[in-house]
Image (cartoon, rainbow, N blue to C red):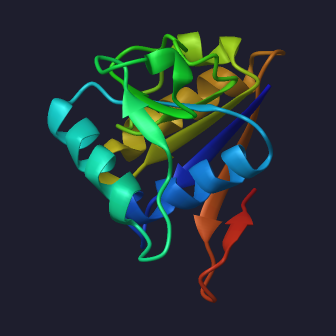
Amino acid sequence: MLVDFYHLEVDPLERVLPSIAQKVLGGGGRLLVVAEEETLLAALDRQLWTFAADSFLPHGRADGAAPEAQPVLLSSQVTPLNGATNVALVDGRWRDEALSFERAFYFFDSTTLGEARQSWRALKGRPEAEPRYWKRSDEGKWVQGP
């Protein structure tokens, strides 16, 4: 399974996550977005409604109505109530439960860089995981690093 490490050096999570979610939904998939902090989940919930003037991402909360019907589900648990095969770990904390998905997106910034490095080393030694590192280029595009 692919584990994409996204290093948030320039753009904040609130700008990056919607584009990842759009790509997942555009490919016919579903996404589970995981964070422990309620304040982060609430901020992402608002952002997914308003990230673009002409569109929104259909989503809901695991503790809300009909979580199983949500294309993008925000949760504090790595439990795909919506049948997602893609998971986004957005609080900089790796969870081994993500290995049961087809693809994981792991977002980290300078405050969680140490944990990301530990997670990278741990995943490099696991045959079921293919970690890939992504960062913004000087031109503003996401490029895969070494």
Q: Is residue 62 above or below residue 74?
A: above
Would you identify the image quadrant in which residue 96 lies?
top right
Q: Is residue 74 above or below residue 25?
A: above
Q: Which residue is nearer to you in this view: 103 or 64?
A: 64
Quadrant of the frame with the N terminus: top right
Image label count: 0
Q: Is residue 3 above or below residue 56?
A: above
Would you identify the image quadrant in which residue 82 lies?
top right
Would you identify the image quadrant in which residue 10 lies?
bottom left
Spot occupied by residue 86 in the image (x, y as percentages of width and height): 66, 30
At x 58%, y 61%, the residue is 19
At x 75%, y 56%, the residue is 146
Q: Is residue 42 above or below residue 66?
A: below
Spot occupied by residue 60 in the image (x, y as percentages of width and height): 39, 33
At x 47%, y 59%, the residue is 56
Spot occupied by residue 98 in the image (x, y as percentages of width and height): 59, 18
Q: Which residue is nearer to you in this view: 46 or 17?
A: 46
Q: Which residue is nearer to you in this view: 146 or 50?
A: 50
Whether residue 34 can be seen here: no
Whether residue 17 can be seen here: yes
At x 33%, y 57%, the residue is 47
Lateral position of residue 114 relative to residue 121, left or right: left
Spot occupied by residue 3 in the image (x, y as percentages of width and height): 69, 34
Q: What residue occupies the far right of the structure in this picture?
A: 127
Q: What residue occupies the far bottom of the structure in this picture?
A: 139
